[in-house]
Image (cartoon, rainbow, N blue to C red):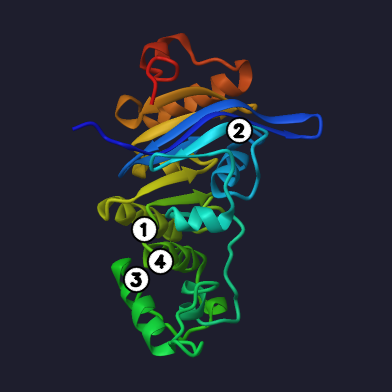
Amino acid sequence: MAEKNIVEMHNIVKRFGAVVALKGVDFYVRENEIVGLVGDNGAGKSTLVKILFGIYAPDEGEIIIKGKRFKRLTPKKAYELGIVLIHQERTLCENHPIWRNVFMGRELTNRYGFLKIKKMKELAYKSLAALELTKMPVDTPVKYLSGGYKQGVQISRALTFEADLVILDEPTIALSLAEVQKVLEYVRELKRKGKSAIFISHNIYHVYPVVDRFVILNRGEVVAEFYKKDLTPEDLSEIMISIARTGKVPKEYEELNLYKKASP
């Protein structure tokens, strides 16, 4: 049985004044697939996922999510469709406890409007336990957590609300080696739970272990797409260096390039 696309983006164009940040980008993610979205600074990676999450509106193009077509989204609509964005700028309230951060903006209340604190703590613990994040009590203020633990809390937030697609924008930036490995394990757990993810990173050695497929952006355009199984990290590094310098995939890798050879 063919895998379904959970998300498709067709001919996405985004302009900021005279600057064209995205130039007709086509992009898709399948069910239970981890996609590595990579490229040099200014390639358009964050802009693309911010359009998918509804932070930016595309100037041209179409977005299809679970078969439904949209010209643009809002963050509220993206949440409703099961999409969660975890920013490189962490969106946690440092002085609030873990459980409050897990439910931030989507608190559970009873019919009188009072917070269901006990229930939220129970559900937060259950979600954190799925990621083996039970070292710190759910009442612990976030400011006392390590960088990797904080990323885990954000992923836990996504799991709590049954997100189908988790977008991770530079989730390993400024983390120690041990914390990076923990974040990668969180991503593997998403895969085991049947979820999909988009993993953006400048560091291919961080993204390589957990993805199924790479999409390479360069100056606002998709220039290459590869299955991980066809490349070593060294191959990917060579390809990205060539693209950054010349805008082209090295000839010896052209046959492996999926882009423009097959439609989603």
Q: Quick one: SS at disc 3?
A: helix
Residue 243's image quarter?
A: top right
In the rendered image, residue 241, in percent from the top left (x then y), is placed at 55, 24
Question: Identity of the amino acid at label 4?
Answer: Ser
Give me the disc on residue 186: 1
Whichever of callouts 2 and 3 sits on the residue coming sooner in the sequence is: 2
Q: Quick one: SS at disc 1?
A: helix
Q: In the image, what residue occupies the spot 43% across and 87% down?
A: 116
Question: Identity of the amino acid at label 2?
Answer: Asp
Badge 3 crowding class, 10 Å Cα cut-off, few under 14, some 14 to 19, many 20 or more, is many
Depth order, front residue of 67/232: 67
Question: Identity of the amino acid at label 1?
Answer: Tyr
Give me the disc on residue 156: 4
The residue to which callout 3 is attached is: 127
Whichever of callouts 1 and 3 sits on the residue coming sooner in the sequence is: 3
Q: Is residue 39 visible?
A: no
Looking at the image, is 134 positioned above or below residue 153?
below
Whichever of callouts 2 and 1 sits on the residue coming sooner in the sequence is: 2
Q: Farthest residue in the left direction?
A: 1
Q: Quick one: SS at disc 4?
A: helix
User: Label 2, label 1: how many angstroms apart (C-alpha)?
Assistant: 25 Å
